[in-house]
Image (cartoon, coloured by chain):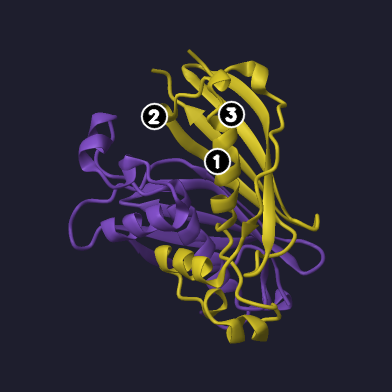
Amino acid sequence: MSDQVSYDSLEVGAELAEVSYPATRLSLVMYCGASGDFNPIHWNERIAKSVGLPDVIAHGMFTMAQAGRYVTDWAGPEAIVVEFGVRFSAPVVVPDDNSGASIIVSGKVEQKLDDNKVALALTAKSDGTKVLSRARAVVKLP
Amino acid sequence: MAINPEFAGKTFPPTEPYQVSREKLREFADAIGDTNPVYRSPAAAQEAGYPDVIAPPTFPIVISVASSSKALADPGLNLNYAMVVHGEQRFEYSRPIVAGDVVTAQSTITSIRDVGSLSMMTTTTEIRTVDGEHVCTAHSTLVERGS
């Protein structure tokens, strides 16, 4: 967790440092259990391939959760997420090896709104492909 | 066959009350790999101004899916779940979910439309405490690929 970000210290257009988050087969099995989404395309390679996927893929909501973590880690403990939305543009393919996939999230300050709110434009990529598009979070800062 | 467009505008009954526990929030935070103490430590959450541990921003999906999946299972809707992918997701929050909350979720199918060989359906799920306080609204777009 990072330090607290303040509204007054931010400038529109400021780039946020990118962060890489791992997605392994174990992460997906844990996410199945925690979310209740046991769709086999998230844990069974045979079924994933039978429906035309290259391999097991991460839950879209797992990928969105990594972008959420990026926002809350950047914004600090006193920040409140007011709005958070994404479009799932491509799946995160998770191979059956020791390292799995990486989800690389970056962002920038898109807009300063009233009432100490800021809008962040987010980008998430995996294996060079954009996996989230139109990803945006509005955060209220101290 | 595509999703039945007659279901657009249909609102489903609210779910049974869902009790949010510290253990579930920690399990969810572990599953997304998020080590933030406000999801695990009541002391850390209180220091940040909350009565108890809070939920990560995407946790409401667990509650909203429990509500919308019941709606989507209606055979009249004719949704082929094997062909469905998650297209978009958006949350609007009045406040974070806090351990101890008892909430219900109510889903409405807001639109159904065909785009080429795809059927797109949007649902809106309102999550409120049993006392009626609004906590979060979840908007989902599901895409059914043509079979």
Disc 1 crowd, CA 10 A, few/some/many (<14, 14-19, 20+): many
Q: Which residue is mark 2?
A: B82
Give the image location of residue B141, x and y in percent: 57, 36
**Is label 2 or label 3 in front?**
2
> Which residue matches tag 1?
B88
CB of mark 2 within 8 Å of CB of mark 1? Answer: no
Which residue is depicted at the point 69% across and 34% down?
A: B12
B49 vs A138, nearest the viewer:
B49
Decide: few, some or many residues near mark 3? Use Cα within 10 Å; few <14, some 14-19, many ≥20: many
Q: Earlier in the sequence, mark 2 or mark 3?
A: 2
Q: For the residues marked 1 and 3, what is the alpha-carbon distance in whole angstroms?
A: 10 Å
User: Which residue is at the front of the view, B109 or B14?
Assistant: B14
Chain letter of mark 3 equals B
Same-chain check, marks 2 and 3: yes
Residue type pointed to by label 3? Met
Mark 2 Cα within 10 Å, few/some/many (few <14, many 20+)?
A: few
Q: Label for residue B121?
A: 3
The furthest residue to the left: A97
Left or right of B51 in this view: B83? left
Rendering quarter of residue B100:
bottom right
On the rendered structure, is A26 left or right of A12? left
Q: Amino acid at mark 1?
A: Glu
In 3D space, how far apart are the residues under numbered discs 2 and 3 (Cα atoms)?
A: 15 Å
Chain A colour is purple
Marks 1 and 3: which is nearer the front? 3
Secondary element at tag 3: strand
* Chain identifier of the yellow chain: B
Judged by depth in the image, the label closer to the viewer, 2 or 1, is: 2
- Verify CB contact (< 8 Å) between mark 1 and mark 3: no
Q: Position of residue B3 (x, y in %)?
A: 54, 19
